[in-house]
Amino acid sequence: MSRRLGWHLLTALVLVGALNCSAGAQHGQDPVPPASTAPSSGANPTEQAVTEQQLFQEMRKLEGRITIPDYKAALLEQPQGRSYQFFHERLLPWLMGGLIVAMIAGLALFFLVRGRILTEAPDSGIKIRRFNVLERATHWMTATCFIVLALSGINYVFGKRLLFPLIGPDAFAALSQWSKFAHTAMAWPFMLGLLIMAALWMRGNLPDRHDWRWLREFGGFTSGTHPPAGRFNAGQKLIFWSVVIFGLVLSASGIIMLFPFWTLDINGMQWAQYGHASAAAILIAVIVAHIYIGTLGMAGAYDAMGRGEVDLTWAREHHSLWADEEEHRIRGRTDLAGTAGTPAE
Amino acid sequence: MPVILASIALAVVLAIVSGLGLFSMQRPVYQSQPMQSVRVGDPGHNLVGPNWSGNPSQPQNSERALNATSREPG
């Protein structure tokens, strides 16, 4: 029994050896000699050589030597570059497009539910000054710049995806070139207008004790009444501070990008782009809401910035505290004029 | 409406002025980063030169200089 088992084992070993030899021959390889009989070739010369991946992990970037004066071109790879590419090519279009579309959809839904906000009482026919010429001029100058900046900025993100297939390479190249000129040129009057607006309206937009009620009642939408408000209600204050804060972020990051590599390296430039694009996406969505409420959303709102005057009824319903102040001021002035006009006895 | 139109005009004027200011600060690459070992470092004698119009059919300074050199009796 044990002899038969021994024969079977020997036969199996021979067969396995034959199969190994034939497999090596099939792949065009010589049978590997046993380790003990292999000739020694010394150390593998590339065994300890550093790989690109190791360099990248250790140094976090790959740099070389170049002969052109632009030293930045020596930087071949940097880990932040991949994050930037992901942001610019994948995240940003969804972020910007999602915010704008969500805002438009929300406003459309609001309009369907609430309709146009009208004054409950009929117009009084008495007009009071809401914004003076300087305020309106600053607003419209900044608004003009912002629209051009927003459209040309959107072209940076969506142009190659939406416009390019429609109008072709030549028209898209010309449009993008002029958009770029407009973007860099219009940025300066925008920044000027932003600073003037901040100086003109900052005091009136400081938070006060009525803001919380206005926000809680969503401007009267949930309560069905008009919550008291001064010259600017809490909604307008939110828009104002959004414009100031995100406008300043856009201005600072825009100046950094207008003078590239002046103070920052490639990673700093990428961060400027993160800030600029994110602030732009948020501000465009905010301004869409501002344009809606200033035109279609509320009757009489356009007159405030268009003509500079509003009806007293509109002022009483939407800005009751400010309307009271204005009435007192006008009455005082009239009384003063009446007293001055009374001849002395 | 006059205020709106005036504001738009003001925005355009300020944009043009600031744009011209920005463009005047920019220099062509052969001026801002000149190199001896690269042919654009001497634009007067090779390549397109400083007065390049972008029209390839129009002879440039460099071509004129080259033609004049080739016409000289040798």
Image: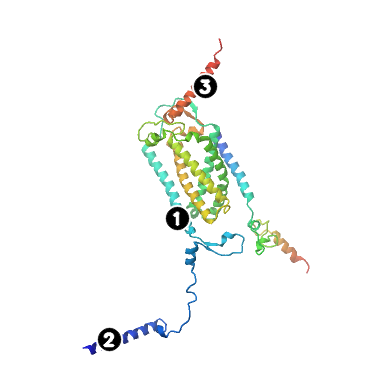
Q: Nearer the viewer, residue A237 or A166?
A: A237
Of helix, strand and loop, which one carries label 2? helix
Work out whether disc 2 and disc 3 sit on a shared chain.
Answer: yes
Q: Colour scheme of this structure image?
A: rainbow
Q: Amino acid at mark 3?
A: Arg
Q: Furthest-left residue in view?
A: A1
Q: Position of residue A345 (x, y in %)?
A: 55, 9
Q: Residue at x 54, y 19 (%)?
A: A337
* Camera-side mark, 2 or 3: 2
Q: Which one is earlier in the sequence, the residue at label 1 or at label 2?
A: 2
Q: Amino acid at mark 1?
A: Arg
Q: Which residue is mark 2?
A: A9
> How many numbered discs sit on the rendered protein?
3
* CA neighbours of label 3 inside 10 A, class few (<14), some (14 to 19), many (20+): few
Separation of residues labelled 1 and 3 (CA atoms): 60 Å
Which numbered circle lies on residue A90? 1
Which numbered circle lies on residue A333? 3
Separation of residues labelled 2 and 3 (CA atoms): 121 Å
Q: Nearer the viewer, residue A326 or A64?
A: A64
Is residue A180 placed above or below B45 in the rendered structure?
above
Separation of residues labelled 1 and 2 (CA atoms): 63 Å
Q: Position of residue A109 (x, y in %)?
A: 38, 41
* CA neighbours of label 1 inside 10 A, class few (<14), some (14 to 19), many (20+): few
Q: Chain of mark 3?
A: A
Q: Which one is earlier in the sequence, the residue at label 2 or at label 3?
A: 2
Residue A92 relative to residue A19: left or right: right
Is residue A30 placed above or below A341 in the rendered structure?
below
Q: Chain of mark 2?
A: A
* Camera-side mark, 1 or 2: 2
Of helix, strand and loop, which one carries label 3? helix
* CA neighbours of label 2 inside 10 A, class few (<14), some (14 to 19), many (20+): few
